[in-house]
Image (cartoon, rainbow, N blue to C red):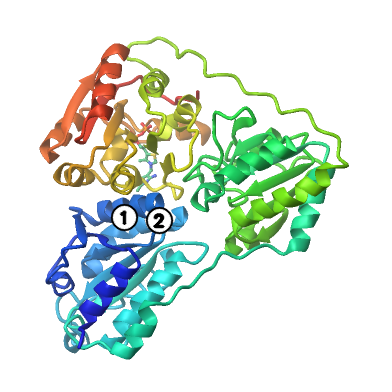
Amino acid sequence: MATVREAVYDLLRRRGMTTVFGNPGSTELPFLAQFPGDFRYVLGLQEAAVVGMADGFAQASGQATLVNLHTAPGVGHAMGAIFNAQANKSPLVITAGQQSRSLMTLQANLTNRDAARMPHPLVKWSYEPPRAEDVPHALARAVHMAELPPRGPVFLSIPMDDWEQEADAEAVAHQTGRSVGGRAAADPASVRELAAALAAAASPVFVAGPDIDAGGGWEKAVALAERARLPVWATPATGGGRIGFPENHPAFQGILPPAVGPLSETLAGHDLILVVGSSVFPYYPNIPGPLLPDGARLVAVTNDPDEAARAPMGDAIVADVALTLEALLEELEQAARDHPERDRPERRADPEPPPESDPMSPSAALAVLADVFPDDGIVVLESPSSTPALRNRVRASRPGSYYFAAGGGLGFGLAAAVGVQLAQAERRVVCVIGEGSVQYSVQGLWTAAAYGVPVTFLVLRNDEYAILKWFAELESVTGAPGLDLPALDCAALAEAYGVRSRRAGEPADLREALAAAIDSDAPELVEVSVAPGMALA
Ligand SMILES: Cc1ncc(C[n+]2csc(CCOP(=O)(O)OP(=O)(O)O)c2C)c(N)n1
């Protein structure tokens, strides 16, 4: 007879979920006992780093990913990272140990008093099974919930004495083999109507969002833009955890500004705005204005009913993004016959040479990165004041090449880079990060070193929270404390965690250090001193 533990490992194995991210405690050891040889346990030294790594891994592998945390305090440390995973629509199955069932009512030490309530608003489903023999079923349910669209994290609390109990073999046999698919096609009538509107519009525009990449719709998005001759904008960087369209493509125009007024101003003159795989819109900060330019209609395609319902304007089609793009392409083929061809959109300019300064500007540092960046490289970005400059200079052109915390919580970047690199061993990951941001999941450096994960960490060191100084100006705030970061030495921190580090002062040193780090089979950190302030291009 199989135990609950054996049944759970069998289920995980069958679903290919053999990489487990965790930080263990006494309440998790019974789950980890006799850890199977075909599984890999990736230890993170703090839970924000554990969940951040798993988030990167889940997104870059496209697979539900198991996380194991230590009862209430472990979940507590992880909450900010779970918030990010929710915004990233990352299919994480987060488990946490719980006190033994017989000791929960008297509330023995480490009892998670209300385990399912704790992460509740941040997950799609949160649960503590009522009986030990329900654990395999609850885990199967958790995996399906995490993977069904819109994807996202789920949480399961598991009492520590459940693992040795006997599983219900017949029930487990049914649960383990189930396949639950959720890619729903759009109503053909709405697709026909949208195709007709696109063909009839005088000046339609396409806004590409992160779920195009996550949902495998990249090539179809390119085909749609080319066939209908649409100019393409990326959804605002604030909510663009991934990019949905090649940023070096001639149709690509740039990134929409994130605030209401400037966004609609940018789209002025278009009569049809097609938004695919994004919320409408990830606005920030509050700069009021009209929601849409005069005379424009907006139609969003999203697999997320909540995104569709909460949009403040426009129509929406709730369906799988890639399938809908495909259906739209087929319809457009019919419609194109009686529609005169539009001019192709104008190509945006190449990046300007960066200004010269000492220390170099963040744009100059990113221009060096763009020069040495491998064709199939992947950027994980958490350098708030240089987000626009990075996007402008690197211009990622392949699917799965860019990851960013759509939730805006720091701590994603460094950890996620380790997870992305673990999932994409054949490609090279460069984590571009501010020295302030490094601190929120700095323990990920240890995991990179301990597991030989060859991420290049490029730390842009400006000795300040540059983005917050920029926001202070925007909000007319003067005299705010706590915005300077003198003497924060990330190169020394990296060495302490076992990661080789280099410091670069001049562009030529930076080029050499970055090229060597990217080429290395081990993780390396390159710290470059850059001028303070925002880098917009
Ligand atoms: C968990 C969390 N805490 C605080 C913030 C607020 N915050 C946003 S950007 C920022 C500064 C980041 O500094 P750094 O990484 O050095 O980048 P820079 O602004 O200098 O580009 C802070 C503290 C946040 N977004 N998330």
Quadrant of res 116? bottom left
Residue occupied by mark 2: 85
Q: Residues within 10 Å of mark 2 (few under 14, many from 20)?
A: many
**Quarter of the figure with the N terminus:** bottom left
Residue 144, horizontal then vertical, whole percent: 43, 71
Quadrant of res 179? bottom left
The residue sitting at the right extreme is 338
In the figure, is residue 480 to the left or right of 351?
Answer: left
Quadrant of res 508? top left
- Mark 1 residue type: Ala
Q: Nearer the viewer, residue 365 or 195?
A: 195
The disc placed on residue 54 is 1
Q: Say which label, 2 or 1, has the lower sequence index.
A: 1
The label nearer to you, 2 versus 1, is 1
**Alpha carbons under labels 2 and 1: distance apart:** 9 Å
Residue 500, horizontal then vertical, whole percent: 15, 31
Q: Secondary structure at mark 2?
A: helix
Depicted 34 relative to depicted 501: above or below: below
- Mark 2 residue type: Ala
In the figure, is residue 272 to the left or right of 439?
Answer: right
